[in-house]
Image: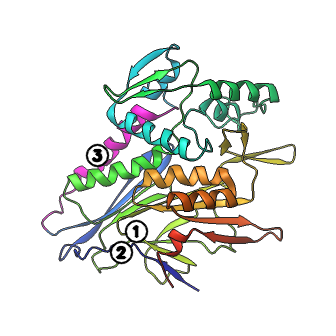
């Protein structure tokens, strides 16, 4: 049975008469990005957009990448204890938002937990896929947790400054990709583009409609199917088989799952999603969490936090926060069951 998710508000603005779909794509943040947009007949000379879109992503990497040692984030991570650093506006805003999610989730997500991510081999060095990798000891995890608990990154909105208390390793990978989707969407609007679908590493945001009047459809796989490497795909038409089809009309969607990055050691599977509260990779029954939101940055961060919390606590938090969320849970028989928040159920047109 196909179920269709629709936004509460649908704009009546049509795509430009005679408009055509144009595609742009590239690489950034270790993944691919793509943009589909509707160009008006008199607005077809859009080759400059390829460079402009890539430039937006390059700017985000230069500010917020924990892989680039000379990024603004890298400089913050190396700063002396007690030093205040002025941050670029976008970096400051993303960090502020991430720390807000950390507070609201009770620490299930924490942008200051980069040291733990690095310990488990999912950071820029000491990678889990290198032959010399050794899983961290209980003592190493305890030290990192103690440092995280004592860390007091403070933000001062006047001057957009942040305090490095000493040894804090910021990691914005659970929010920066979603922010990059929002950034590309904003850039398109500055160029007069109102109808588009933006994707970065599987996270998506859409606006307007296609030339045929259809919204930008995204299909989620059947719950009972084996979860693929990419749980969402752009759907060319409603007829594509899917249990849940989303109309990305003024909406964004992001999914977190334990199947994307992990390693196996001693017969045990270790997910790349780290619970900052325990210092350990998550080990719950969740296969994936999808969040639908007006902002992709929010969908990205909250999908991570809900994944860490697990189905029961995550669903309860989604209800408190008013989040449209879908939880896919592995059952004892090897299949999958689905749990939807009331806010997502309220968007379904069955």
Circle 2 is placed at which residue position?
Answer: 215
- Identify the magenta region: 42-66
The answer to whether residue 147 is above or below residue 101 is above
Circle 3 is placed at which residue position?
Answer: 51
- Considering the numbered disc 3 on the image, is that residue within a helix, a strand or a loop? helix
- Considering the numbered disc 2 on the image, is that residue within a helix, a strand or a loop? loop
> For the residues carrying marks 2 and 3, which lies nearer the camera in this image?
2
Given contact means CB atoms under 8 Å apart, are the residues at marks 1 and 2 in contact? yes
> Left or right: where does residue 333 sit relative to residue 245?
right
Q: Which mark is residue 248?
A: 1
Q: Position of residue 148 (x, y in %)?
A: 63, 28
Of residue 123 and residue 131, the one placed in the foreground of this image is: 123
The residue shown at (69%, 56%) is 310
Q: CA distance from mark 2 to mark 3?
A: 26 Å
The residue shown at (34%, 79%) is 214
Q: Position of residue 222 (x, y in %)?
A: 63, 75
> For the residues carrying marks 1 and 3, which lies nearer the camera in this image?
1
Q: Position of residue 233 (x, y in %)?
A: 51, 67
* Magenta region includes residue 268: no
Given contact means CB atoms under 8 Å apart, are the residues at marks 1 and 3 in contact? no
> Image quadrant of residue 223?
bottom right
The answer to which of marks 1 and 2 sits earlier in the sequence is 2
> Is residue 125 visible from the viewing direction of this image?
no
């Amino acid at each position: 049975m196909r179920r269709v998710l629709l936004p509460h508000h649908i704009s009546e603005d049509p795509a430009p008469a005679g408009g055509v779909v144009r595609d742009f794509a590239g690489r950034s943040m270790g993944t691919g990005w793509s943009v589909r947009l509707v160009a008006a007949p008199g607005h077809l000379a859009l080759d400059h957009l390829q460079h402009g879109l890539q430039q937006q992503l390059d700017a985000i990497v230069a500010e917020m990448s924990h892989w680039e040692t000379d990024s603004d984030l890298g400089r913050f991570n190396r700063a002396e204890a007690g030093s205040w650093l002025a941050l670029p506006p976008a970096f400051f805003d993303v960090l502020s938002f991430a720390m807000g999610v950390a507070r609201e989730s009770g620490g299930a997500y924490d942008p200051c937990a980069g040291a733990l991510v690095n310990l488990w081999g999912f950071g820029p060095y000491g990678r889990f896929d290198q032959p010399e990798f050794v899983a961290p000891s209980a003592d190493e995890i305890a030290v990192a947790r103690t440092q995280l608990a004592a860390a007091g990154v403070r933000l001062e909105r006047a001057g957009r400054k942040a305090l490095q208390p000493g040894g804090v390793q910021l990691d914005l990978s659970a929010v920066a990709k979603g922010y990059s989707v929002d950034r590309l969407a904003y850039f398109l609007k500055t160029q007069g583009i109102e109808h588009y679908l933006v994707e970065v590493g599987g996270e998506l945001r859409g606006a307007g409609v296609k030339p045929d009047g259809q919204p930008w459809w995204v299909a989620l796989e059947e719950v009972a199917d084996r979860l693929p490497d990419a749980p969402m795909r752009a759907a060319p038409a409603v007829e594509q088989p899917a249990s849940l089809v989303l109309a990305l009309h003024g909406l964004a969607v992001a999914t977190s799952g334990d199947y994307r990055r992990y390693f196996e050691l001693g017969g045990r599977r270790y997910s790349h999603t780290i619970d900052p509260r325990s210092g350990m990779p998550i080990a719950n029954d969740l296969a994936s969490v999808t969040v639908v939101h007006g902002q992709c940055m929010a969908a990205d961060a909250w999908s991570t936090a809900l994944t860490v919390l697990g189905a029961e606590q995550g669903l309860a938090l989604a209800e408190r926060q008013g989040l449209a969320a879908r939880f896919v849970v592995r059952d004892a028989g090897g299949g999958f069951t689905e749990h939807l928040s009331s806010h997502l159920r309220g968007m379904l047109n069955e």
